[in-house]
Amino acid sequence: MNICDRCKNPTNITKMSWFNTDDLCCDCQKQEEVHPDFAFAKEVENEAVLNGNTNFPGVGWPGVRGRVKRWPTKPSTSSKGGVPTTSPRLPPTSLPGTWA
């Protein structure tokens, strides 16, 4: 038996949140899927993985009625001809709480 990180109820099945590293029960997962920032959280997570960050902590869970803060879309570039090294949609730091 597992415990949902968000509601703290016991559950047999968990799935990781798209917003952060919480393991969620089915009810909390459904709640997350209807959040207005759900698509954004998935997009940022996917971009992080495509850029090689398989340990991305997420954009942060803003709560049921909260919203995820957006950051300026300023791409960083490498020293090799100005090729972008990270997505402009990714947060400017890897520390959760500094952007969410």
Image (tube, rainbow, N blue to C red):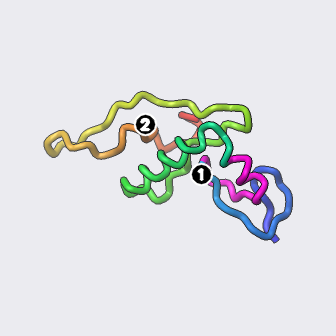
Residue 13 x %, y %: 75, 68
Which image quadrant for residue 39? top right
Residue 43 x %, y %: 48, 47
Residue pointed to by mark 1: 18
| Residue type beneath disc 2 | Pro
Which one is in front, 37 or 19? 37
Residue 73 x %, y %: 38, 31
| Residue type beneath disc 1 | Trp
Question: Which type of secondary structure does the marked residue at label 1 adopt?
Answer: loop
- The magenta stretch is 19-32
The residue shown at (79%, 67%) is 2
Identity of the residue furthest to the right in this view: 9
Residue pointed to by mark 2: 92
Identity of the residue furthest to the top in this view: 72
Q: Is residue 29 magenta?
A: yes
Q: Does the magenta stretch include residue 88?
A: no
